Amino acid sequence: MNNMFSKAAIWVVIALVLFTVFKQFDDRGLAGGATPIPYSDFLDEVKAKRIKEATIEDRTIIATTSDGKKIKATVTNLDRGLIGDLVNNDVKFDVKQPEPPSFLSQVFISWFPMLLLIGVWVFFMRQMQGGGKGGAFSFGKSKARMLDENSNAVTFADVAGCDEAKEEVQELVDFLRDPTKFQKLGGRIPRGVLMVGPPGTGKTLLARAIAGEAKVPFFTISGSDFVEMFVGVGASRVRDMFENAKKHSPCIIFIDEIDAVGRHRGAGMGGGNDEREQTLNQLLVEMDGFEANAGVIVIAATNRADVLDKALLRPGRFDRQVVVGLPDIRGREQILYVHMRKVPIAPDVKADVLARGTPGFSGADLANLVNEAALFAARRSKRLVEMQDFEDAKDKIVMGPERKSAVMREEERRNTAFHESGHAVVAKLLPKADPVHKVTIMPRGFALGLTWQLPEHDRVNMYKDKMLEEIAILFAGRIAEEIFMHQMSTGASNDFERATKLARAMVTRYGMSETLGTMVYEDAEQDNYFGRMSAKTVSEATQQKVDQEIRSILDQQYALSRRLLEENKAKVELMANTLLDWETIDADQINDIMEGREPRPPKAGVPVKKPTDSGGGVAPTATAPA
C-alpha cells in the first residue's frame, strides 16, 4: 500500500508542475469570455460610439460594449491614432504594462526540462536496479529477505535423507540456543558453513531448518543479487546485509548459489576491478576482518565448490563444509514419507518399494514423484493415491511421457518387441545383472521401447564382471533384430555408444585390462576457458593397443550375448509376442516367460493396450539399465 501511495503522490506532483507551467503561458486572464473580432471591426464599433470602456495590454485590446458584451482585438503594431479615436468617442480606457514573470518562475521554466530528464533517468535506473525500497538512490541496500523466528516453521522433522548433514549442523543449533556452552570452554563456533551437493538435495531446506530449530532470524539472498552493472554496488549491499544481521544477532545469513559471486579471482577477463571481484573482497572482509560478527553465522550453498576462491574456503570464513549428497535407499524412503503426509495415500502404497525403484533421485525428484502421482490420481477421479499412480508417475519421470499419438507400422512394432526382448532375456540370464523391472514397447520420449532394470541396493562401486555383463546386455537388442527379423535398424545406436564408452573407460581409466595393466591412458575431462577437453598422454603405438583391447572386450561380449539368445529363442519369441499383445509387461510376467510358463494377465486396473497398424516414422529405441 505504501508503494502504491508513493507512486500516486509522484504522479500528482507531476500533474501540478505541468499545470503551473502551462498556466504561465495562458493569456486568458483578462480575456476570459471575450469574443475575438478583427481590428477593423473594433475601430468601426468605436466610431459608432458602441464601445463603453477598453483596456490595452501588450497589443491586446479588451473592450466592453454599451450592451455589456466583451470583445477582444489584437493589433500587430500599436496604432498611434487609436488613442485619439477613443478620446473623441468618449471611451474610457486604460493602458497596462504586462507584469514580468517572477525570478522563481523564470528559474523554474528554464530548469524544468533538465529536471524532467533527471527524473526520467532516475526512474529507469530504479527499474534496472530492481527498485530499492529506500528511495531512488538505494542501489546499495541489501536485498536479503528476513524470516523471523515466528514465520519460519521448518524444522529438522521436515528434512529427511541427510542424517549425516543434520548431525554436522546440530551444534550450530546448540550454539545459537546457548552460546555460553561453547564459549566457557574456549570453543568457537564456525563462522561459515558451506553446503555442497547436487541440485535438489535439500541444501536450502536444511538451512531453514537450522534457523527454525534455533528460533533465530533467517536472512536469505541469492549470490546473483549482489552483482549489478555499477562497480561498488555489490560491496555496498554486502556491508548493508551484515549491518542488518548484527542488529538481529544471533541470526543466520543464507547465501544461495554463492558461486555466482565467489569464483576464483583473476580468472576472468575483468582483472581485479570488476564488480564481482569487488563484491567478493567485501564478503571476505565482512566474514573475517577487523570487526567481529558475533552471533552471525553465514551458511552458503553451491553445487560447484571446485570453482570457489581459496580465500573463501580457508579457516575463519567457511570453516566447515557439509556434503548434502543424493539420498540412499533408506533416505529416499524417509523423504517419501515426509511428502506423502501431504496427500491421501491408499493402503497398497509401499514407500520401500518406491525407494528401491528410484535410485539416483534427489529430494526434489521425490517430491515431484509424489506430486505427479497425485495428478494421475486426480485425472482418474480417485479419492486416494494408489500404487499404480506412483508407478505411472515414476515411468513418466524416468522414461518420459507416453507418446500415445505415435503411429507405428506392424513391422516396426515387431522389430521393437524383439529388440527389447533381447535386452530383457540376456539381463535375466546373466548372474550379476540387475533384476528386470519392466519392459515396454510403448513409445516414451525419444525411445520406441525400453527395458528397465532396478538394482537391489544402492551402487557404490562398479565391478569388472558387472560392467562386462552390461555391455553384453546393450548388444542384445541389435543381435535379436538380426536373429529374428533378419535385419538391422538404427535403434541400437545409443546401445553401441554406451557400450563403447563403458569399454573404453575400463581400459583407459579403471585399469581393468590384463594386457595393458593398471595404467591410466586418458586423463579425465578437464575444464578450460573455452569448455571441456580431454587430454591424451599416450603415443600412437600405445593408442593402437588401447583400441585393440577395447575391440577385444566388445567382441567377446557380443559373442556371449549372441550365444545366449541363440540358446533361448523360444523365450525371446514368447516375450516379443506378449509385448505385441500387451505392450508392457512387469517383473512377474517376465519371470513366467523365463520359467517356460504362459505369462499371467496384466494386473487389475492396468489398461491393456491394443496394437495399431498404420504408417509412421522411425525413432531410436533405448534400454535403461539402472
Image (spheres, rainbow, N blue to C red):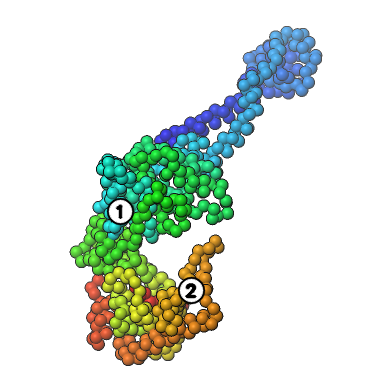
Instruction: Looking at the image, tell me whether mark 1 or mark 2 is earlier in sequence order.
Output: 1
Residue 201 vs 609, above or below: the answer is above
Q: Which residue is mark 2?
A: 522
Which image quadrant: the C terminus? bottom left
489 vs 204, nearest the viewer: 204
Residue 34 vs 222, above or below: the answer is above
Can the viewer see residue 421 in this picture?
Answer: no
What percent of the width, then of the height, locates residue 437?
Answer: 29, 75
What percent of the width, then of the height, locates residue 298?
Answer: 38, 46
Q: Which residue is mark 1?
A: 168
Residue 431 vs 125, above or below: the answer is below
Q: Quadrant of residue 396?
A: bottom left
Residue type at mark 1: give it.
Glu
Residue type at mark 2: give it.
Glu
328 vs 442, nearest the viewer: 328
What percent of the width, then of the height, locates residue 207?
Answer: 33, 50
550 vs 34, nearest the viewer: 550
Q: Residue furthest right?
A: 81
